Amino acid sequence: MDRDLGSEPTPIDKSTVLDVKPLRFLVPIFPNAASASTPQPTPFTFTLPSGPFPPGVLPFYPFLVQDGSQRYASGAQNPNVDFGVGGSIPAPVPLNSFKTPSTSHPNGGVNRRKRTHRGTVDIEDDDYSFSPNQSGQNGSASGFSAPGNDFEIGSTGKRKGGRPRKIVPENGEDTFDVTPIMDSFLAVFKIHDFEEFRRSIGDTDAAQTILLVYDLIRRRILQLEEAKGISSGVSRRPDLKSGAALMAKRDRTNKTRPIGRIPGIEVGDIFFFRIELCVVGLHAPSMAGIDYMSFKDTGDDEPLAVSIVSSGGYENDGDDADVLVYSGQGGVQRKDGRMFDQKLERGNLALQKSLTRGNDVRVIRGIRDNNNLAGKIYVYDGEYRIQESWAEKHKLGCNVFKYKLVRVPGQPEAFSLWKRIQQWRDGTDTRNGVIIPDLTSGAESQPVVLVNDVDDERGPAYFAYAPRLKYSKPFVTSNFTTGCQCLGGCQPGDTACPCVRKNDGALPYTSLGIILTNKYPIHECGMNCACPPDCRNRTSQAGLKIRLEVFKTKDRGWGLRSWDPIRAGSFICEYAGDVVDVVDADEYGNGNDDNYVFDATRRYKQLESLHDDDSAGVGKSPFPLVISAKENGNVARFMNHSCSPNVFWQPVVCESNNDSYVHVAFFAIRHIPPMQELTYDYGMVAPEKVDKGKKNCLCGSTKCRGYFY
């Protein structure tokens, strides 16, 4: 309010409530530099937080560019900038940040930034950026954060509007030292012994091992954070922490990022986290939908697209299994509704150049995860070629680039298989070769179809379907404990819960039945516990959660596979049957025709590598358990042997009164695509028995030892 200098001050009514709205943003004012077009510059220029900034002027703390990325304005090369206030100020917090970045990591944590061949850029994330297919200004060097698929852990941290809540641990800290966890797994799997060419070029073993180590680190971080109460009521990002840790140590593969096929990655492979695409080199940027690289020809750098991720951010037409109409990057800002045309630059230009040159482009399709609505499953659908491109008006009025990609013929099924399985479920298509729609006769919560599309055999020899293990007598427990009183189910970090204490103070599963522990046996809630049947600590007791199929193989009898994608660590089933008296266990199976035997007394190599060195009984049976599924059994009896299995087993103990009942639970070693056979290693017998019961192995693995028992 203007007033004369000599007048009396206007009295202020302090009882009045003013309707004041906060400013959306501040507009810094900088001196306007002279130029050829303005030889007599105006005293000042007004600059939006997103720039452009006058020459020599850095971004004004704490403002950043508002393009949905977490990059700094042009000219700001060092994120720790001296703003003239007596020292370096930490990098400003992005306006759309979901976590406050830490500038120092005294406990060995890693700074979530990525060093690329074009410099250092901040992490980006397609689920939290404004433009779904937005690419970083450095093309493929777009950082390596990933959409969160870890919202299954039973906390109340849910995304609202596509963004997770800020990570705020109860103890006030927002960092977690992953270095000891990571180093232990790297040592067990000897990642540092990989030759440099396996890191740069890659192969199947390198890719699978790195993905396995990544997921083991991620799950272990998840478990420890839960146990420490770091995630009460909020969401965590262990996927980012484990991925960032591996990237920082350069423990990845396929660094050369070739055009076309990626060694070690097969068409149809699935991924549950965007950062997994990065660590195996399938798609380098974890936020940007378009990955491209420079191609030198005629002396100039020309961008060529190497891969795209179609995850539903834009209105991509991806219903056709062999044709994808892909929208370019940039354009409409989803947050504030501003509209502007897409530009033929960066990823868009790379796609246009790939159309001209006719190079293959890898396509990864993002599909909703029905078991975890907060996340997606990324399916590698193989190589495509861009057939045509055009620009069209978006429904909001701006111009958008469109690219029509056609799948290269002769590749294995991937996305088309997913569509056909969905038709089987919906009843709009018929599964060929069905013998029995449900061989369990309703004994399981999920039907298990029996299929033979190979020959005329009408099914396996008769057996009675039994969903659970049958004991003649239980094991006697010497250190029996009373059951829990967790009426709402056992909770992570509850030190008063005896079941949590028996599992070293942490629950062994997520709420989706994904195993978190590296130690065995697992102690599940038993008959004396007051927790409900859906308690997280009763995962193996809940029965089948995956739609399975018993099918006739070409050369190995009957086998087992799934219609559903199976996430690494997921519970699959238990081995049901009749427990053989341990007195006869040494002789059982010698000279009889029982081919449906599970012998826990054997050595199981994959168990040794998956468990900590200090685990009791590594390489040994914690209980002398032998199971016969010849007369009574479930789907597990059809799982074939493989020297490179995708399934492993864990002993699970349930107590009742003073007795213990040991069950054998199977879990996925890695992500398993639909219709891929489920196999486990049958184990090795004692040296004195090596000449008894040896059978020829037909698993076809590159690591096949030629026989099994």
Image: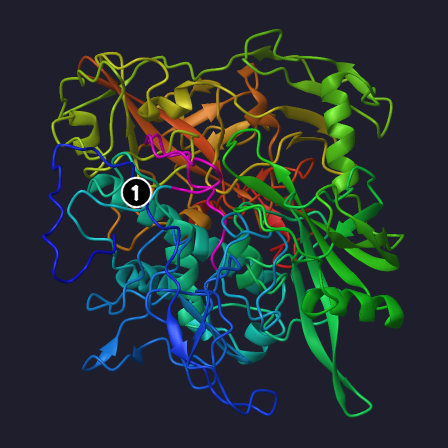
Tell me where residue 271 appears, x and y as whole percent: 58, 48
- Is residue 244 visible in this depiction of the protein? yes
In the rendered view, tell whether residue 60 sits above or below residue 312: below
- Asked where in the image residue 664 lies, by quadrant, the reply is top left
Tell me where residue 200 appears, x and y as whole percent: 59, 76
Whether residue 662 sits left or right of residue 396 in the image: it is left
Can you identify the residue that label 1 sits on? 223
Let me know if residue 504 is in the magenta part. Answer: no
In the rendered view, tell whether residue 391 sits above or below residue 268: below
Whether residue 505 sits left or right of residue 427 in the image: it is left
- Pick whichever, 58 or 205, lies toward us: 58
- Which residue range is magenta in the image? 145-164
- Pick whichever, 430 or 491, lies toward us: 491
Name the residue located 37 percent from the left edge and 68 percent from the top edge.
28
- Asked where in the image residue 70 lies, by quadrant, the reply is bottom left
- Is residue 553 visible in this depiction of the protein? no
Q: How is the image coloured?
A: rainbow
Name the residue located 82 percent from the left edge and 90 percent from the top edge.
298
Tell me where residue 483 appears, x and y as whole percent: 18, 17
Disc 1 crowd rating (10 Å Cα; few below 14, some 14-19, many 20+) is: many
Q: Label 1 sits on what residue type?
A: Gln
Q: Secondary structure at mark 1?
A: helix
The majority secondary structure of the magenta stretch comes to loop
Count of marks, rendered view:
1
Name the residue located 54 percent from the left edge and 66 percent from the top edge.
142
Q: Quadrant of the C terminus?
A: top right
Name the residue located 25 percent from the left edge and 45 percent from the top edge.
168
Let me know if residue 159 is in the magenta part. Answer: yes
Tell me where residue 38 appears, x and y as whole percent: 56, 87
- Pick whichever, 530 or 393, lies toward us: 393
